[in-house]
């Protein structure tokens, strides 16, 4: 955890992994431009009013050398003209800001949805994310794959969101502002990343004990990458006879009542879908890298990475633990 | 009663209590008092006590967040800490301390001998105080029969459905609900008292248009309290119905609405911010003129702006809900109403500026805190405008930027002005001056600590750090900023400890203040320090907004200009 001088530098703000000032999709871009306007206006107001204040404080300080120190300064009780001017000028500024804001609100919330848009259903859970692709028949967790959008043939992704339990909020700052994920309610937002790669974010509405470790990873894939990914995710789980024992452990424990593994008896829906768990790069909503050792630790005691997570410790013996870990790592 | 009492025993009133130890007598006196000054002081003392507790909670929070993946406290403990910190600071520090000053000052400033309903006053204080104790009792009784017990961990907004039985078993949420409910009862009682006192008990000559601005502002603030505490109280009752009597108002598992709670909460919550900041304006309106040696500029505009803020602040609540998905129409409306409030607020800042302009500023500690307030409130107002820009809020809402913004309002605005008020009125309340030397140390330490903490805190928000997380990833570039924020918190702590020391030391050793140490203009400076329990031997009568100015400058009295 070395503190480098680069931590202070501006690039940190502009190129930060989750900085709102390094936008890479239309919604985040239009917020960015608007925010620059707002910053410019507020900064000018600050310089003018703050400057006047500073001037007044220095200029009108009591000086003991003053020849008529004993006298009170001239009493001035007010002036209607002056009051009027500093009422009208702020009103004009407010109207201007309001119009600029309304434009961005409508252009973002009422953007027409192109037929080429990708649909994803997002379901917030205490403390992980479920992603379903209704038209593609895919269910996955915590790591969202979407298409890069070429401005000439836009392929934005529309996220239809709701929650299975408490309130959450979907926030990937470089793509768009946040949108709350609320039970009994459906919210929609859209993103259209312009460059391929990984975008980070996390839950932005306090949702319970592990709100902090409800991280988000959004992969913007090129069309070719996306097609491969989809084809892979649509397959049932890998069947590797060398880990048959691990599969048996999984199927004979309560794992199956919380997790789904397509093509097996496991059809639980309380926890993340594990059909292709090994294809993800992290486990437990970004709490730990997806390695065999970490899976083993997590299954043995979820609280190790995530105290308060809703998966109970399963109390498997060492042998079963090793077997089930081996099985899960084959679920590519 | 047949027994005859010997005459001397009847006459001698002291014997029955003489054997009681001194402290018991003093205690009895304070517990049973209905004197507005004593109640005011109790409010203030009680708030200071909770300030230390909730400040300590903040310190633990900052230690935990100083570095990524810290394990100083567990997530469960952390979530309780921020819930208790927020709830305590709003309901059991800010509200009581502001009501304390109001209670103490309003009768003195309008030339009355007490509040309109002295016993209601005492009741309101005790019921609020009990609310605070109940909140902290949750640390022992919170889990009820389930376990050892602990405090609520639902955040100070207590958003549904996190408070539903399914997600919050045990009684921690119930303690929170009842504490807020009681504090609300106390608030309504005191607000009622202030409104009645101001309307009915002004001394001869004190027309509404001659009232000190402090009194005007407390009047508006109390009227707002009626409108805003009611939905909060209603929501608490509804929540209890949900939790114990099987209703499903907020129970989303059974078709209830999470957004309904948000509306109830913020219809209270936003005006509440103004209920808290208005008294800070009130102090500024009294203190800045006296230390600039000039009458307040634009008294009628100040009153109008206060009333304007009162009304507009009731129509802006959903700017706390820009990310809820209300739709473009509602978002646009609340952008507009929220921005409108900048206009009356701006008028106030400009009028303070004009008051200073052409004056002779005396840099007492009190004035220095007031000047700090002016700059910081300006900045807080400007970040507020940024957050009122709904799309900007989609990014910044619920991030550390918001946390920085509202601490700028509450600490940089309200707390700075409160410190200013302490240095200004402490001599009146105790008869002793606070040490200016310690005061300057307090000011500079607190100023540096404040800016280190809350200027920097905007940055992790911009970098995508959400609030209410007990830890964060090391690779996000948030650490250095959090480390600085946390170190600023330490410096602020030292400042506050100096202040508390000053309060205690000056009580015994401070210079004797006399009736009017600041050469003030309002009625409270015309009586002794501390004032006798009846305030004024003869009820004063006034001919202008600054009766003591008129006395001191008979050649040029104020009423020539009103
Ligand atoms: C009571 C329901 C429940 C049971 C039983 C259960 N899990 Fe889980 N599991 C969960 C939940 C909930 C999560 C998500 C935790 C989080 O990230 O907050 C999870 C997460 C996981 C993950 C990480 C998945 C990912 O993509 O991040 C693995 C692996 C896992 N469980 C394996 C198992 C195994 C193996 C068993 C049986 C030995 C099991 N679970 C039993 C509920 C359960
Ligand atoms: Cu969350
Ligand atoms: Cu608000």
Image (cartoon, coloured by chain):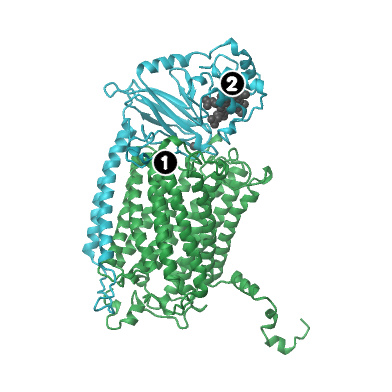
Q: Position of residue A231 (x, y in %)?
A: 44, 14
Q: Nearer the viewer, mark 2 or mark 1?
A: 1
Residue under the image location 27 percent in, 79 percent down: A71
Residue A95 lies, in percent from the top left, at 26, 47
Looking at the image, which is closer to me, A314 or A206?
A314
Query: In this rendering, would B309 be left or right of A44?
Result: right
**Residue highlighted by disc 2:** A325
Residue A243 at x, y = what percent? 60, 14
Element at label 2: helix
Q: Where residue A209 appears, x then y in whole percent?
A: 55, 39
Secondary element under disc 1, as helix, strand or loop, is loop
Q: Which chain gets the green colouring?
A: B
Chain at numbered mark 1: A
CA gap, disc 2 and disc 1: 37 Å
The colour chain A appears in is: cyan
**Foreground pick, B398 / B341:** B398
Question: Which numbered disc covers residue A3?
Answer: 1
């Amino acid at each position: 955890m070395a503190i480098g001088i680069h931590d202070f530098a501006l690039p940190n703000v502009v190129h930060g992994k989750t900085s709102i000032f390094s936008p890479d999709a239309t919604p985040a871009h239009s917020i960015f431009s608007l925010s620059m306007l707002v910053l410019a206006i507020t900064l000018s107001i600050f310089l003018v009013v703050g400057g006047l204040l500073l001037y007044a404080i220095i200029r009108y300080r009591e000086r003991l050398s003053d020849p008529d120190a004993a006298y009170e300064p001239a009493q001035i009780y007010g002036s209607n003209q002056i009051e009027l001017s500093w009422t009208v000028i702020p009103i004009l500024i407010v109207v201007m800001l309001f119009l600029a804001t309304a434009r961005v609100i409508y252009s973002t919330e009422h953007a027409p949805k192109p037929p080429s848009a990708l649909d994803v259903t997002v379901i917030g859970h205490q403390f992980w994310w479920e992603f379903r692709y209704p038209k593609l028949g895919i269910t996955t967790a915590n790591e969202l794959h979407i298409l890069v959008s070429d401005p000439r043939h836009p392929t934005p992704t529309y996220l239809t969101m709701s929650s299975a339990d408490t309130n959450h909020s979907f926030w990937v700052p470089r793509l768009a502002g946040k949108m709350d994920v609320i039970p009994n309610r459906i919210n929609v937002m859209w993103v259209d990343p312009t460059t391929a790669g990984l975008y980070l974010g996390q839950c932005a509405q306090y949702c319970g004990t592990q709100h902090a470790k409800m991280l988000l990873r959004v992969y913007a894939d090129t069309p070719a990458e996306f097609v491969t990914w989809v084809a892979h995710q649509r397959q049932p789980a890998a069947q590797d006879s060398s880990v048959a024992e691990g599969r048996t452990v999984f199927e004979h424990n309560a794992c199956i009542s919380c997790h789904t593994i397509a093509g097996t008896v496991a059809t639980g829906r309380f926890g993340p879908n594990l059909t292709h768990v090994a294809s993800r790069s992290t486990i437990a909503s970004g709490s730990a890298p997806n390695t065999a050792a970490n899976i083993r630790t997590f299954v043995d005691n979820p609280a190790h990475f995530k105290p308060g997570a809703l998966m109970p410790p399963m109390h498997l013996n060492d042998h079963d633990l090793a077997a089930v870990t081996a099985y899960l790592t084959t679920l590519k | 009663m047949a027994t005859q009492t010997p005459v001397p025993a009847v006459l001698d009133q002291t014997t029955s209590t003489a054997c009681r130890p001194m402290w018991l007598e003093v205690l009895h006196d304070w517990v049973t008092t209905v004197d507005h000054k004593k109640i005011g002081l109790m409010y203030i003392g009680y708030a200071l006590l909770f300030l230390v507790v909730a400040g300590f909670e903040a310190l633990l929070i900052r230690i935990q967040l100083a570095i990524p993946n810290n394990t100083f406290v567990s997530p469960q403990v952390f979530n309780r800490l921020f819930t208790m910190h927020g709830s305590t600071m709003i309901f059991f520090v800010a509200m009581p301390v502001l009501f304390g000053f109001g209670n103490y000052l309003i009768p003195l400033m309008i030339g009355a001998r007490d509040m309109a309903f002295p016993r209601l006053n005492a009741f309101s204080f005790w019921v609020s105080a009990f609310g605070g104790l109940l909140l902290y009792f949750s640390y022992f009784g919170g889990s009820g029969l389930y376990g050892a017990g602990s405090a609520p961990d639902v955040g100070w907004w207590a958003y549904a459905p996190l408070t539903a039985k399914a997600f919050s078993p045990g009684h921690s949420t119930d303690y929170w609900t009842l504490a807020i409910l009681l504090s609300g009862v106390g608030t309504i009682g005191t607000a009622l008292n202030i409104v009645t006192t101001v309307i009915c008990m002004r001394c001869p000559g004190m027309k509404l248009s001659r009232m000190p601005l402090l009194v005007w502002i407390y009047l508006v603030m109390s009227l707002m309290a009626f409108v805003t505490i009611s939905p909060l109280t209603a929501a608490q009752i509804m929540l209890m119905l949900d939790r114990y009597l099987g209703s499903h108002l907020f129970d989303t598992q059974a078709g209830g609405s999470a957004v309904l709670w948000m509306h109830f909460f913020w219809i209270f919550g936003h005006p509440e911010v103004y209920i808290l900041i208005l008294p800070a304006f009130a102090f500024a309106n009294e203190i800045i003129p006296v230390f600039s040696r000039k009458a307040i500029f634009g008294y009628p505009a100040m009153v109008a702006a206060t009333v304007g803020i009162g009304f507009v602040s009731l129509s802006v609540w959903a700017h706390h809900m820009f990310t809820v998905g209300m739709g473009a129409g509602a978002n646009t409306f609340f952008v507009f109403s929220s921005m409108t409030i900048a206009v009356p607020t701006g008028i106030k800042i400009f009028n303070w500026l004009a008051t200073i302009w052409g004056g002779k500023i005396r840099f007492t500690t009190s004035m220095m805190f007031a000047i700090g307030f002016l700059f910081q409130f300006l900045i807080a107002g400007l970040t507020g405008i940024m957050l009122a820009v709904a799309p900007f809020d989609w990014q910044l809402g619920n991030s550390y930027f918001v946390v920085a913004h509202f601490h700028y309002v509450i600490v940089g605005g309200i707390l700075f002005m409160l410190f200013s008020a302490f240095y200004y009125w402490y001599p009146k309340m105790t008869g002793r001056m606070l040490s200016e030397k310690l005061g300057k140390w307090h000011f500079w330490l607190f100023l540096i600590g404040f800016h280190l903490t809350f200027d920097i805190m905007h940055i992790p928000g911009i970098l995508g750090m959400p609030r209410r997380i007990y830890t964060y990833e090391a690779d996000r570039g948030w650490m250095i900023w959090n480390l600085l924020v946390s170190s600023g918190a330490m410096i602020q702590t030292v400042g506050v400890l100096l202040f508390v020391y000053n309060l205690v030391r000056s009580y015994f050793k401070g210079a004797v203040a006399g009736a009017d140490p600041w050469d003030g203009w309002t009625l409270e400076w015309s009586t002794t320090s501390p004032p006798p329990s009846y305030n004024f031997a003869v009820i004063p009568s006034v001919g202008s907004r600054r009766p003591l100015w008129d006395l001191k400058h008979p050649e040029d009295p104020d009423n020539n200009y009103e």
